[in-house]
Image (spheres, rainbow, N blue to C red):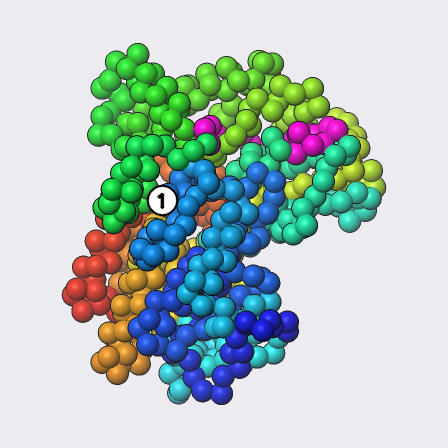
């Protein structure tokens, strides 16, 4: 396999303390923490560079949807001081530069094996270690296996009849060419209207001669109002970065959102409207914190749905197109809302058309483009923005076998089961970072990553000091956590949507709400209590 001068060779004859899979933000910070604790750790990464999500998702318009001041590492004051974000929501190239900077600053690359995918990971009972093989033929022995494989890293295997016969180019948003794509003068089709499409459509529309958007289900999208970082945030952060970070982490979503305790149903309609307007004008996810009952009460949620529908009508000139772009099949916030720059207004452009795949189903591709039941569309290029096999996809694709040779796919046959989203019963010494059963995708991922990495590093340090060799979630603790994850989401409207949170976008995937909806602040306290009680629910030997 390709290795660069700065890349590690991990074909270690001796056993590593830990092997980390993935060199995104989670894997990089995990490596740094374990090294700092004096443990011998290395990383295996499938990509040719670090950065995970921000390495792969290079489509036009890709940018973060949580303000960069909060979507960035807080663990090192030096790193924090020397890095300046150019805008509220950093674009992908800047996020990738940041990931590279982190790798350089902490000299991480010498322990990262790039261009290498983990193929198998089998627990060896006798040696009390994981035996890992890679697609490059290496075998690596490690005491602990840490999956930092990302929640949205494996695209779904969506395909369309005849796609191979299409004479134009096909691009997937999550596997975008590194050299970029110039759509000037082209007739372009895009399938999907999730976050990836909603970010890329306005940019592609500016370049292409014609853009046709194939929509199956409309999504709620809020304006980013991207620009300079708001003065109030900058001041609060500069005054006391530690306090600012702590305030972000002490929230349900891991970012500051002015979460209100007020109930929309107890508030006069004009005040509800005024508050939603104020938050819409601020931009991004702030509207999510407007009222405490919108995530649990259909009537309160309906007020936000109606408000967003009115905003879509304000932005889209053609009422029929506005209506088509308005979600009707799921409550607001039950799919991750999108954050856009000029998405709805793009449909006022003369070179953009919207095709409703519900009334005009896609039949097949042919050599010239796409046939629906109504028309043939001719394209030079088609973009697939069709989503990810979320939360379990990257883990399922590794042949992982725990104690007694049990396959993780079998253990998770009815949906992913974990204890705290950190460990799986029967899979000793294997950790997941932002795994199913943790708040992860419902939060600011970097704050969730920091919490997980620090908990795992503390745990391994304790084991190391006590010369204990294995830790495993007990069956009982795992079963209780799975019940608690289900209970935590029950009062909310979240399970009502056919979302990737529910596994609904992958045919055959078990329907189960995968992330923990109890909030990052509550979850962090639970994890701390578990550790304080001597790692309650874990079997340590
Ligand atoms: O994927 P999605 P995404 N025929 O699953 C459609 C994060 N993210 O990559 O809803 C036709 O949301 C599908 O239609 P439907 C963020 O957490 C963040 O956009 O199944 N259409 C849907 O419209 C986000 O939630 C950012 O009916 C088909 C679309 O494809 C998550 O990643 C940016 C189809 C997929 O939407 C996923 O977002 C980007 C078919 N056969 C992503 N199959 C930030 O802003 C699927 N679709 C940070």
The residue shown at (38%, 67%) is: 32
Residues in magenta?
204-226
- Depth order, front residue of 97/474: 97
Q: Residue 29 location, x and y as percent?
A: 39, 62
- Quarter of the image for the N terminus: give it: bottom right
Query: Percent x, y for residue 541?
Result: 26, 80
Q: Is residue 211 magenta?
A: yes
The location of residue 491, given as percent across then percent down, is 29, 38
Determine the residue located farthest toward the front in the rendered image. 82
Foreground: 299 or 51? Answer: 51
Q: Disc 1 marks which residue?
A: 70
Question: In which image quadrant can residue 443 be found?
Answer: top left
User: Is residue 468 depicted above or below 354 in this figure?
Assistant: below
Pick the front one: 16 or 225 = 225
Q: Which picture quadrant has residue 31? A: bottom left
Q: Is residue 334 left or right of residue 199?
A: left
Does residue 216 belong to the magenta stretch?
A: yes
- Residue at 41 percent across and 74 percent down: it is 41
Q: Residue reaching furthest left?
A: 533
Query: Considering the numbered disc 1 on the image, is that residue within a helix, a strand or a loop?
Result: loop
Q: Residues within 10 Å of mark 1 (few under 14, many from 20)?
A: many
Q: Is residue 524 above or below residue 142?
A: above
Asked whether residue 359 is in view, the answer is no
Query: What residue is at 47 percent from the left and 57 percent from the top?
Result: 101
The answer, for residue 85, to whether it is visible in the render is: yes
Left or right, 25 with respect to 490, comes to right
Residue plotted at (42% across, 72% down): 145
């Amino acid at each position: 396999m390709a290795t660069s001068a700065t890349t590690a060779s991990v074909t270690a004859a001796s056993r590593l303390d830990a092997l980390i899979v993935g060199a995104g933000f989670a894997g990089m910070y995990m490596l740094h923490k374990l090294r700092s604790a004096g443990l011998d750790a290395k990383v295996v990464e499938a990509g040719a560079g670090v950065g995970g999500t921000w390495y792969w998702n290079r489509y036009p318009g890709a940018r973060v949807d949580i303000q960069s001041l909060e979507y960035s590492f807080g663990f090192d004051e030096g790193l924090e001081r020397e890095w300046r974000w150019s805008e509220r929501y950093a674009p992908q190239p800047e996020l990738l530069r940041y990931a590279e900077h982190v790798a350089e600053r902490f000299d991480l690359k010498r322990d990262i094996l790039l261009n290498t995918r983990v193929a198998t990971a089998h627990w060896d009972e006798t040696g009390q270690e994981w035996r890992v093989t890679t697609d490059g033929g290496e075998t690596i022995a490690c005491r602990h296996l840490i999956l930092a494989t990302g929640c949205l890293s494996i695209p779904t295997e969506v395909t369309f009849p005849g796609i191979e016969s299409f004479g134009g180019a096909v691009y997937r948003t999550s596997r975008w060419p590194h050299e970029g794509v110039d759509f000037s003068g082209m007739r372009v089709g895009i399938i999907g209207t999730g976050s990836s499409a909603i970010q890329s459509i306005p940019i592609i529309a500016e370049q292409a001669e014609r853009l046709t958007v194939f929509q199956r289900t409309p999504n709620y999208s809020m304006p980013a109002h991207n620009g300079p970082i708001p003065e109030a945030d900058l001041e609060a952060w500069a005054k006391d970065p530690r306090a600012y970070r702590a305030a972000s982490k002490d929230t349900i979503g891991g970012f500051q959102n002015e979460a209100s305790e007020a109930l929309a149903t107890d508030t006069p309609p004009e005040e509800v409207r005024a508050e939603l307007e104020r938050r819409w004008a601020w931009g991004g996810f702030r509207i999510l914190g407007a009222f405490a009952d919108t995530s649990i009460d259909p009537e309160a949620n309906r007020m936000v749905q109606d408000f967003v529908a009115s905003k879509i009508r304000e932005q889209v000139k053609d009422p029929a197109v506005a209506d088509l772009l308005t979600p009707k099949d799921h409550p607001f916030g039950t799919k991750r809302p999108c954050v856009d720059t000029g998405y709805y207004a793009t449909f006022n452009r003369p070179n953009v058309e919207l095709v409703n795949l519900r009334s005009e189903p896609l039949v097949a591709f042919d050599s010239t483009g796409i046939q629906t039941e109504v028309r043939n569309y001719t394209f030079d290029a088609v973009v697939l923005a069709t989503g990810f096999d979320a939360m379990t996809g990257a883990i399922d694709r590794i042949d992982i076998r725990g104690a007694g040779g049990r396959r993780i796919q079998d253990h998770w046959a009815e949906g992913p089961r974990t204890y705290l989203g950190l460990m799986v019963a029967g899979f000793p010494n294997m950790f997941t970072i932002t795994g199913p059963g943790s708040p992860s995708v419902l939060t600011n991922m970097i704050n969730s990553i920091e919490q997980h990495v620090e908990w795992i590093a503390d745990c391994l340090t304790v084991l190391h000091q006590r010369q204990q060799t294995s830790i495993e979630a007990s069956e009982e603790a795992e079963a209780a956590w799975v019940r608690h994850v289900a209970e935590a989401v029950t009062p909310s409207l979240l399970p009502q949507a056919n979302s990737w949170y529910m596994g609904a976008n992958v045919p055959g995937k078990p329907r189960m709400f995968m992330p923990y909806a109890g909030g990052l602040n509550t979850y962090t306290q639970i994890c701390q209590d578990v550790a304080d009680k001597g790692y309650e629910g874990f079997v340590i030997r």
